Image (tube, coloured by chain):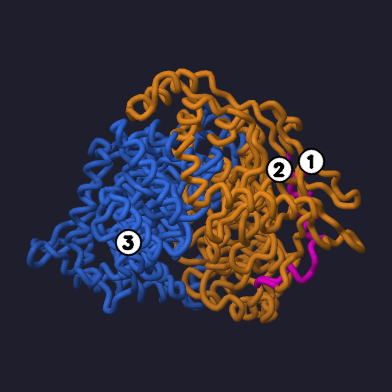
Chain colours: A orange, B blue
Amino acid sequence: MTQAPNRALFTDLYELTMAASYFAAGMNDTATFELFIRELPRNRNFLVVAGLEDVLDYLESLRFEPDDLAYLQSLGTFRNDFLEWLETFHFTGDVWAMLEGEIAFAEEPLLRVTAPRIQAQLVETFLLNAVNYQTLVATKAARVAIACRGRRFVDFSPRRDHGFDAALKAARAAYIAGAAATSNVLAGKLYGIPVAGTMAHSYVMSFDSEVAAFRRFARDFPGTTLLIDTYDTIEGARHAAAVARELAAEGITVGAVRLDSGNLAQLAKDVRRVLDEEGFPEIRIFASGDLDEYRIAEILDAGAPVDAFGVGTQLGTSGDAPWLGGVYKLVEDSRGPRVKLAERKATAPGAKQVYRFAGAGGVFEFDMVALAGEQGPLEGRPLLRQVMEGGRRTLPPEPLSRIRERCLANLERIPERLKSLETVSPPYPVRHSAELERLLAETRARVAAANRPAAAHRSEAT
Amino acid sequence: MTQAPNRALFTDLYELTMAASYFAAGMNDTATFELFIRELPRNRNFLVVAGLEDVLDYLESLRFEPDDLAYLQSLGTFRNDFLEWLETFHFTGDVWAMLEGEIAFAEEPLLRVTAPRIQAQLVETFLLNAVNYQTLVATKAARVAIACRGRRFVDFSPRRDHGFDAALKAARAAYIAGAAATSNVLAGKLYGIPVAGTMAHSYVMSFDSEVAAFRRFARDFPGTTLLIDTYDTIEGARHAAAVARELAAEGITVGAVRLDSGNLAQLAKDVRRVLDEEGFPEIRIFASGDLDEYRIAEILDAGAPVDAFGVGTQLGTSGDAPWLGGVYKLVEDSRGPRVKLAERKATAPGAKQVYRFAGAGGVFEFDMVALAGEQGPLEGRPLLRQVMEGGRRTLPPEPLSRIRERCLANLERIPERLKSLETVSPPYPVRHSAELERLLAETRARVAAANRPAAAHRSEAT
């Protein structure tokens, strides 16, 4: 076992320089930051929220260790009084968040932090890292689940994910949004996710013939899946059937065959015919190899008799849209609501809540973003829940099974048109409350006025 | 501090089922696997190899802990004799590899493992995970470095990288291939990479005016970079100049301004003019915000006076090509060379070595892949070095500075045309030795014959 590096320094340097400046200026008033996604990624009509468990675990345990402080001191950038103060640093703020497995849309706060300014600022990098990636993969997995039309799919991504942590989090996020299992054994152990997998081409190549390999593996793992494309897929199917026939006398069955290359739709049809002709209609067909939601939809549209899918690279990297542009912005401090006016990157002021309105059968109709302080619309369901108060969780960690159930129930309730694999127009409606609109106009006018040239000169004179 | 999870179970389940089957069959002869990339990703003309340090650290420390074995037992898939054997498992093989910072091309082995079959197979998932991602980002960073034409660039990716480990490895891989620094403080601490960063928009928004924010920050961090686009970039430049003028009397300078939104090329020109007019030609311009190698090239092609760049999302996710399809294939075992014939996924047999031939000025001319056993061409430089023997490193871990120097020296020697940001044709020449060609033809014919239907029937009869 090795020690995991302490996460306190997992931050952009500017969080620490800003913190040092606030500390020197005595600016540690209460501030509120919100984490949101400005625009949905390409072809996405909704997001599946994930990453909160990591966020809360980090906030609860955040401490600077002596070697962290020694490193910071070695940079020559920070004053000693600030480093001494960091020694006692811990997070004492409040957090409101959408629970994992909730559905979110662009411009909705997924998470809101209210804490002394330095604390609220310092946690930005970790929070964004955790929520951006895990939400990205949970969203991708939901799309794969939609494309699979009720068939099982398995996370096969570890070898192509962006490092060790990504592979663990990909397995977890994919499971939340509908994956039946993961090939990642460590994820299975850490999160209690079902694990799946049988043989690689190298196994088949390790025997003198494909039949010898199949025979051995089926005896070791009755009911297993045989990989049939190492040499020739159709011959492989015949070999699988031959072995199934041979071993039937021993009470051993073959559960499935796996195709991993070539024209999967055509091969699935051909292999199905071979297996049926050979008397094994019960042997299922599992397909893998460069799959994503688009290719799965094509394969099923072509009427291919595939029973389950393995999805690797594209699932764990969200290959067609490999990042989520979540941001974490100051929306309020002791002087009131704050905004940023930067071109195409403006923000909305004030601590906010999101209400969801559902119609017949519970189908989501529209969301309304309102100020956290205002009397919310009574019919809407508030999506942000308090998950941390004074630095402590208000709820125990949620079992993954409950998060998954929430997600699957939510996916049942999104409007059918949002299940398109391409962007639909108009998007799901996200409205502002009248009070939020009023505050937005007011604050923007005030800030623009305060930062006009004349104001700057005034400011210089003070 | 928390314990890092033990990495032994960081594996696809099929590695363990195959291992169990080999164990039951007594098949643990010496086998050789090679890790290679079949095709270069979109727009790539070369790869920068990275990830070896992680690989060697993993191989040296690989052990199954009691709780790993308890978990495996709980799956009900494995026999107890196999689990008992795993208790004593450790890696005793030999590893040959291209060192980090070497340049590689498609179909060249980056790494070769020779070990008892079960060991060599079991490490596949971790090896691919480490090499695929780190090589991906090092390659991306080399492209960014080329686009920057000698200007500095800084890794700003942590918030958008795929999790915690990705952000650390992205900083390291980017530094190898030319990044001047990272914003990731923990990466700075762990790897000794220079760290960089100053202020965010939230800092500016935390003061009554931009000028007040700039004044405070410049006093706390003399020579700093001021972020000038929170409200209006041109006004921001005037405010930065005003603060520089005001603080000059105190001996405090402003080092640079940062643009993070809008039309960066145009704004850089306008801001340069403002700063020059205000008498600050020495204040540099730093640009960030959705940058990658393509946008940097555009900005510089437009003659924009940008002195340095921050590159985040696109660097750490390799956004235009977010995965590397590295594979790890059996090429030889005690029975001789092995191949796979699957459509578009065929492999070349035998343990191999890669020789690089350079021309005038040391510029790379072509590579030759030969059998490891054959007398190599004397003029070529062999790229695969023995880095592990009998499970122990043959070389101490390399200092990151040396890896970086190797990489930068190599990048100087790739043919100029390969520095295009798009795929060039023809690609860099990678030839096969005559002996490898002969073995390839021979082995394919043998394997195809052995797996024809008639052969299968023969096999069934044995």
**Left or right: B375 with respect to A114?**
left
Judging by the rendered image, the residue that carries numbered circle 1 is A373
**What's the mark number on residue A351?**
2
The answer, for residue B11, to whether it is visible in the render is no
Crowd around label 3: few <14 · some 14–19 · many ≥20 (10 Å):
many
State which region is magenta.
A399-424
Q: Chain of mark 3?
A: B
| Occupied quadrant, residue A40 | bottom right
B132 up-or-down from B359: above or below: above
Return the x and y of residue B144 as percentages of the image width and height: 33, 59
What residue lies at 59% left-to-right and 55% top-to-bottom? A346
| Occupied quadrant, residue A156 | bottom right
Three-letter code for the amino acid on which mark 3 is drawn: Arg
**Element type at mark 1:** loop
Between marks 1 and 3 in the image, the one whose residue lies nearer the viewer = 1
Are the two marked residues, 2 and 1, in contact with CB atoms closer than 8 angstroms? yes
B108 up-or-down from A14: above or below: below
Q: CA distance from mark 1 to mark 3?
A: 49 Å
Three-letter code for the amino acid on which mark 2 is drawn: Ala
What residue lies at 81% left-to-right and 51% top-to-bottom? A355
**Element type at mark 3:** helix
Crowd around label 1: few <14 · some 14–19 · many ≥20 (10 Å):
few
**Left or right: A65 with respect to A286?**
left
Return the x and y of residue B387 as percentages of the image width and height: 26, 44
Q: Chain of mark 1?
A: A
Marks 2 and 1, the one that precedes in the sequence: 2
Q: Chain of mark 2?
A: A
Number of on-image labels: 3
Judging by the rendered image, the residue that carries numbered circle 3 is B143
**Left or right: B423 with respect to B462?**
left
Q: Within the magenta stretch, is there residue A413?
A: yes
